[in-house]
Image (tube, rainbow, N blue to C red):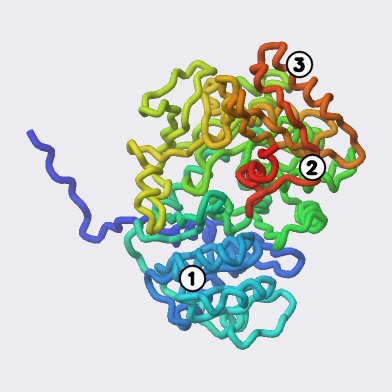
């Protein structure tokens, strides 16, 4: 017998998952919580919400309507946070411009996303001026300056003046929760940057799942209502890992550092008592390099590391300073968070070395994530702690494709799962990344993980940074080449590194083919615009011999 249709009240509200809904709890529970921008601006959540309304009113007066794109070129600031909400809440699309790309790539992304309005920080005016005449869609430029830099003739209004004259009472409408909210671009190490996009529904679900995962541990590696939050991942990059949305929901104090200057960041962490951040490994290395060896300045600071693998050597150094450091995993196409390396209760009972190893894993799947490791035919590899394959994933917040690129979109979602191009294995419940498909080294008929060799070498006291790449070899196909940046005042020889890796091979932990033929000591490693190692460029520079 068929079930009767459920009765729906005539005035029932079919609650759409829109970004504007993220405001209900914080305005009710923590309206007087603080937002801080450097040492320049300090206001409350209720003021932030007023300014969000003013920005939406100002943008509407500038001609922005439903479905239009608004681009932001700014440092991490309260203004960026205001745009995170105002632009999508009015039904427009927030384009976060990667200001570290080349002018040619910035031009490409702007013309591809076609924003009508650009919010432009004076620091990026030279870049904008260089590409201005080639822009195809920009109609209005809104000028931003911390230091009252004079507004150029191509700007139409200043940000603060617009907000001062605009109404805070903008009425944010309901609309389809699948409406596009954001667009940003991959870093373009292989060809032109690709546009990824996210809906309101996706971002709300990502924020809720991320909050549930981060708030769940009993003690360590958690983000809770008593924390003070500061992002150290650029706000233009993958929604600052969606953490500003989570911070708003938890009602915590939020601190925005502007341009990343190590001394200024350390001052802010101490002055504002910051307890939770996230960044790529190179940012953490940069901050640790500023600290005296016995410093307790960052003790108790919780930091999620993503974007690249968390090297054991860096994790060990951070823990030595009292930092609660742990890894997270995701990518531009996943919003980004899919796993977090929090210590499970059984791991917390084990020795320090085991805990350290688990902090450096990619971690455990967060709620709603369907995570698999597969062969090329999409069959699952055994979950035996040693069988590896490509990581594929489903979650309700993954980008559904690349803007205007059907072929790449179909490749991304081949077989109905998003393909990460990362190789990994399951170590119990924990995901462990062994390499990128394009970075794994095939030598002597065996696959060698560049990530594993890097992790071993990172534990040498003299090593500040290390990267391993594959160089073509007539006899072996490829051979590993190791690039090492030494710590100031330290000495290490090529023979030292080879002997160190050979010891792991003798113990059977890695193949003998993983012992590199070539060690190069370099001043710096090539990085992408978001601080990841750029191995494509390294191969071009060093893999020829």
Label 2 belongs to which residue? 522
Please report contact status of discs 1 and 2: CB closer than 8 Å, yes or no: no
Mark 3 or 1, nearer chain start: 1
Label 3 belongs to which residue? 503
Mark 3 or 2, nearer chain start: 3
Task: Work out whether 74 lies above or below 125.
Answer: above
Task: Work out whether 317 lies above or below 225.
Answer: above
At mark 1, the secondary structure is strand
- Residue at screen point 50% across, 80% down: 58
Which-is-in-front pick, marks 3 and 1?
3
Which-is-in-front pick, marks 1 and 2?
2
- Residue at screen point 74% across, 64% down: 38
Position of the C terminus, as image quadrant, is top right
Task: Work out whether 347 lies above or below 219.
Answer: above
**In this view, which residue lies farthest toward the front?**
474
Q: Position of residue 132 (x, y in %)?
A: 56, 77
Task: Work out whether 409 lies above or below 482.
Answer: below
Q: Nearer the viewer, residue 455 or 24?
A: 455
Q: Tell me the number on the disc at residue 296.
A: none
Label 1 belongs to which residue? 70
Q: Position of residue 445 (x, y in %)?
A: 55, 20
Can residue 265 be seen by looking at this rendering? yes
Q: Nearer the viewer, residue 24 or 131?
A: 131
At mark 3, the secondary structure is helix
């Amino acid at each position: 017998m068929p079930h009767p249709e459920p009765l729906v009240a005539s005035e029932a509200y079919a609650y759409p998952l829109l970004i504007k809904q993220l405001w209900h709890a914080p305005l009710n529970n923590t309206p007087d919580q603080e937002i801080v921008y450097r040492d320049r601006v300090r206001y409350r959540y209720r003021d932030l919400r007023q300014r969000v309304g003013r920005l939406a009113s100002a943008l509407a007066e500038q001609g922005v309507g439903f479905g239009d794109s608004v681009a932001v070129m700014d440092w991490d600031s309260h203004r960026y946070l205001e745009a995170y909400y105002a632009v999508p809440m009015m039904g427009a699309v927030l384009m976060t411009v990667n200001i570290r790309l080349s002018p040619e790539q910035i031009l490409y992304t702007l013309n591809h996303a076609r924003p009508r309005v650009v919010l432009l920080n004076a620091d990026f005016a030279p870049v904008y001026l260089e590409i201005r005449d080639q822009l195809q869609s920009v109609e209005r430029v809104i000028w931003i300056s911390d230091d009252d830099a004079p507004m150029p003739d191509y700007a139409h209004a200043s940000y603060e003046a617009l907000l001062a004259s605009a109404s805070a009472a903008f009425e944010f409408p309901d609309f389809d929760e699948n409406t596009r909210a954001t667009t940003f671009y991959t870093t373009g190490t292989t060809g032109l940057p690709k546009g990824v996009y996210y809906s309101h529904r996706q971002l709300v679900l990502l924020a809720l799942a991320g909050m549930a995962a981060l708030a769940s541990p009993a003690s360590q590696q958690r983000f809770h209502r008593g924390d003070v939050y500061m992002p150290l991942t650029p706000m233009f990059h993958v929604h600052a890992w969606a953490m500003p949305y989570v911070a708003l929901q938890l009602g915590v104090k939020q601190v925005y550092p502007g341009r990343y200057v190590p001394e200024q960041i350390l001052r802010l962490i101490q002055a504002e008592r910051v307890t939770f951040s996230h960044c790529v490994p190179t940012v953490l290395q940069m901050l640790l390099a500023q600290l005296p060896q016995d410093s307790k300045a960052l003790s108790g600071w919780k930091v999620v590391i993503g974007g690249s693998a968390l090297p054991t050597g860096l994790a060990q150094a951070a823990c030595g300073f009292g930092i609660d450091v742990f890894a997270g995993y995701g990518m531009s196409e996943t919003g980004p968070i899919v796993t977090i390396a929090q210590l499970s209760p059984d791991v917390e009972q084990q020795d320090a070395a085991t805990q350290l190893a688990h902090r450096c894993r990619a971690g455990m799947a967060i709620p709603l994530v369907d995570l698999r490791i597969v062969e090329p035919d999409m069959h699952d590899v055994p979950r035996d702690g040693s069988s590896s394959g490509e990581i594929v994933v489903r979650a309700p917040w993954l980008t559904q494709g690349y803007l205007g690129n059907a072929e790449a979109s179909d490749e991304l979602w081949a077989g109905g799962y998003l393909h990460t191009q990362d190789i990994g294995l399951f170590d119990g419940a924990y995901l462990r990344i062994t390499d990128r498909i394009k970075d794994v080294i095939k030598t002597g008929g065996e696959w060698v993980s560049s990530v594993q060799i890097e992790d071993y070498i990172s534990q040498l006291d003299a090593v500040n940074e290390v990267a391993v790449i594959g160089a073509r070899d007539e006899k072996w196909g490829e051979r590993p080449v190791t690039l090492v940046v030494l710590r100031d005042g330290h000495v290490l020889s090529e023979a030292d590194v080879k002997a160190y890796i050979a010891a792991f091979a003798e113990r059977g932990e890695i193949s003998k083919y993983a012992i590199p033929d070539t060690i190069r000591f370099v001043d710096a490693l090539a990085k992408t615009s978001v601080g990841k190692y750029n191995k494509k460029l390294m191969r071009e520079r060093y893999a020829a011999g």
